[in-house]
Structure formats: C-alpha cells, structure tokens
Amino acid sequence: MNKILFTSLLITSICGLCTQAKAQLMQAKELYSKADSLRGQLTPLRSCYDIQYYHLDVKVDLDNKFISGSNLFKFKAVNDFNKLQFDLFDNLSVDKIVYHGNELLFTRDYNAVFVTFPKTIKKNQNDEFIVFYSGNPIQATRAPWDGGIDWKRDSNGKHFVATAVQGLGASAWWPNKDHQSDEPDSMLISVTVPKDLVNVSNGRLIKKEMFDDGHNKYHWLVTNPINNYNVSLNIGDYVTMQEKVKTEKGLLDVEYYILRENDTPTKKKHLNINVAQTLEALEYWFGPYPFFEDSYKIVETAHLGMEHQSAIAYGNNYQNGYRGFDSSNTGWGKKWDFIIVHESGHEWFGNNITAADIADMWIHESFTNYSEALFIDYHYGKEAGQAYVYGNRAGIKNDKPMQGPYHVNKEGSGDMYLKGGVFWNMIRTMVNDDTKWRSILRALNHHFRHKQVDYNDILNYISTHTSLNLDKVFEQYIQNKTIPVLDVKFNSNGDVLARWLTDVKDFHMPIHLGIEKNYKLIKLTDKYTKINIKGLSKANLSVDTYNYYINTKVQ
C-alpha cells in the first residue's frame, strides 16, 4: 500500500474515531444531565399533584430476581392538569396504567414516565390511577452504598433479600413520584413471597394471606408520612421477638426480625440493651420517637444498615462499634452498636425531618452523626461526647461542600457525616447553654414534624432560636469546602488584633479564646478587631480549637 495513502487513511480513521468518541462522550454527558434533571427537578409535571396514599402490591420471584405487581397512586391536584410525570427505572417495564377502568397513554424518557389523562383534572380534585409493572430491578453489588436490591442467601442456603436505594432512588424497584419533597400521608405495602420465608416492611403487619400455590402475602400499613427511599422489603427466614420499651409517648411496640441462624440469647440481649439505651438517649435530646403509631423494628439484613422508617435495616453482626471498630479512635465508639444508634438517629433526622432536595442530605447526615455524640453524652457525659466528635475530625477531607447542587439529584461531600457532627458541636459551644441547646433540638423536631425542609429552613430556625446570626457560618461550613482561619496579630505597641480569613465575604463568627483555657466569647469579623484581654500574649494565648473546627495563624 502507498505510504501516503496509508497515512491519509490512518488519519481519516483516527479522526473518525475521535469524532465518534467525542459524540459518544457528549451523548453520555447529555444523558447524565437530563436523566438527573428529570429525577432531581420538581417540574410542573411533578408539582401539579400531591401524593396522598400509595398501595404497593408486588410479588417477588426470588430465583429469577424478578418483581411484578402494581402501585396505586392516590393524589390531590395542586392545579389543573392533564399530564403528569412519575418515575420508574427504564430497565423495568410499565405493563399498563389504568385510570377509572381504562388504560392511559404514556411515554418514557430515561427513568421518567409521562402520563396523559383523557380530560383535565381540576385543582383540589382527589383522584387515582394504578401502574402495573414488572422486570429485574438493579442488583446491588455493594449495598447500601451502590443501591438496588441485595439478593443474598443465608448460611442455610435460604433467600435473604433486602432493598437499599437511598441516592439511587426508590424508582429503581417500584413506580412512584421519586422526589423527596412529596411524601404519601400513609401507605400500604403488600409483598408476596414463598411460604417458608417472611417479608418485613415498614409500619405494622395488619394481615397475612396464605395461598394454595405455596406463597404468602404480607400486608404492612404505614400510618405516618414516609419518604420513598425508606419504603423497604426484607425477605428472609426470620424469627420474631417482641417487647415493649418505655418512651415519652408510652410503651412502644418493638420487634426484632432475626435470621433463624442468629436466634441466640446473647444476640437478643445485645439488641434489647442497645435499642433501649438508644431510644432513651435520643428521645432525651430530640423529643418523642416520631413514628410511635407504626412501631419500631430492627430487621436483620446482609448489608450493613439503612434508616428504613420504623423498620431499620441491621447488619452489624450483633457487636458494638462500626463493624467492631471505633472511627474516632477514642474508645467511646466501641461502647455501643453504631448501626442501631446511627440509623435510629435518622428516625428524627431524615425520616421525621426530610430534606426536600437530595442536595440537602447534609441535614440528615450531619444531625445523625451528631446524634452518636449525644448518645455518648447522655450515657457517659459531655466530655466523652466531645472527645468522640474531636476524634472524628481525622476522617474529614474538606474535598467539596457538604451541600450538593439543587435540582439534579446530587448529594454534597461525604464530609456531611463527620464534618457535619463537628459543625453542630461547634454551634452548641457558641450557644454555651446546654439546656437551651437541648430545647432547640427538641423544638426543631416538633416544629418540622413530618415535613420537608431545605437549607434556609434549618439556618433560619437555628439562628432565630439560638439568637445568633449564623448565615455566614452556615455558608462557610456547608456551602464551601474550606474552614475558617483565625488570624491573631500581636502588635509591637501591645495591641492584640484578630480577624477571620474565609471564602465568605463579611464573614463573622464568635470564638472562645483567652489565657490558658480561661475563655471568653469574642465576636469577630473578617476585619481586624482589638482583643481586650489583659495580659494576653503569644505565649499564653489559648483558643478553643477542640470544639471550634478552625485553623489558626498567630503573628
């Protein structure tokens, strides 16, 4: 072959491949952004209706990892419309959509389903439709972090299956309006499984149907609002243990669903002790358990855990710590079962108070990480709790903001856990009144009970009730990745000046500083302020960097 011709053909081929690759990359980016916008944005096709009730009715074919069934949508029209969007991953089939006995027309775009009604549905009208669907849902390979259905077997070879879809989305396995801003007021979850297994879902078991074909159907009624990713099914060879635990609202029905292979007195005792201690401590700090009517359950799973409302997924192997370890390296983290405390903390933050957009998932995780420290505080004292918080700093990355971008179904940094807990301990230190701080946390759960919130809701509530102007503090710690630097300057004339160096314009935050831990609360801005503490010097300057998550610069 002629070298010039060969070279020309080679360049043409390479350019063609480059163009093709570029086109595929652009297509992938477009797919990524459009699919996420369809999930993350509350468009008029989603805001036009308010979900009142779901009845999810499914049969699980365990051997084939296949699910089929229906979901009834009962809604109230927010305004006039004749078209709406619900969500279901496109690897699952929408078999039909039925409205008043007739099938509706629909189209699909990625994981969104658009339904057209035969006539306009009027504002404030109560109506309903039912979606029939089937298919093989996404299989989780590393639940709960990657999301999907976790298809496993226990040591006896029996099916051991659970859902874990936070982040991925509930529409990965059932059709719903998959946006955290809209929760059904109540829900019925009906799941059909082989008769030698048990299904556990949220709420209370109100009925068990037994069929001649070797299957049983379990009906679970949820009487409180529930966010979509919390709706769960757990299938296994479970043994049930029941007890009543004293709470602020009275004797709470508590149930444990344990694999038959783990049905031992030692493991039951572990659950008894940890659950009682957890509920006692968290009610003290946050107020009454928010889902008393729906009971409280611990359900054993193959994956580590999830905050499924009133049916906490538990896979910590009946041991204290996080898989036996203490992330804080203080010793305090090994005195209690991490999964029971952390996931129970989500009953208040995440389930009771829910972020309207996943961008504000930091609200869930920051408070829940902090609940671990408050558990320690309640049972072992304030110093122990603060030591745990400080120890957790080693895991903070400061890689990106804790808050994610709105309307595209994206969380912020994983720092929302450890940095979030450190943040709330710092705010408590600023308040400097533990009785007041406790009352704020309890009132917060009462004020936003069973509601969806955003960044501004939490900022405004905490600022108002602490009597602190925290807008710049929130902006720096939650919407930026770096932490403030306390710049202290000792002038030759004896004056001591201090200011904040931050990313936020007009930043201001109080700080405890003084001589050898004899602290005073000093209000500082990003402009130098004179510090009037008699005898203060570079040698004896003490800053509360134990409770304030900051860097310092002394000159």
Image (cartoon, rainbow, N blue to C red):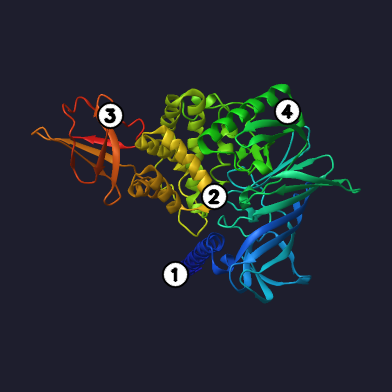
Q: Which residue is mark 4?
A: 262
Q: Which residue is mark 2?
A: 354
Which of the two discs, 3 and 1, sits closer to the camera? Answer: 3
Label located before the other in sequence (4 or 3) = 4
As drawn, which residue projects farthest toward the bottom?
Answer: 119
Query: Of 37 and 180, which appears nearest the observer?
Result: 180
Which residue does the image show at 28% across and 48% down from the upper left? 507
CB contact under 8 Å: marks 4 and 3: no
Mark 2–mark 4 distance (CA, rounded to whole Å)? 33 Å
Label located before the other in sequence (2 or 1) = 1
The C terminus, quarter of image: top left
Q: Is residue 528 left or right of residue 549?
A: left
Amino acid identity at mark 2: Thr
Mark 2–mark 1 distance (CA, rounded to whole Å)? 66 Å
Q: Which residue is mark 3?
A: 519
Mark 1–mark 4 distance (CA, rounded to whole Å)? 74 Å
Query: Of 454 and 233, which appears nearest the observer?
Result: 454
Which of the two discs, 4 and 3, sits closer to the camera? Answer: 3
Query: Of 511 and 461, which appears nearest the observer?
Result: 461
CB contact under 8 Å: marks 2 and 4: no
Image location (x, y in percent) of residue 370? 48, 36
Q: Is residue 419 left or right of residue 336?
A: left
Amino acid identity at mark 1: Ile
* Local secondary structure at mark 1: helix
Which of the two discs, 1 and 4, sits closer to the camera? Answer: 4
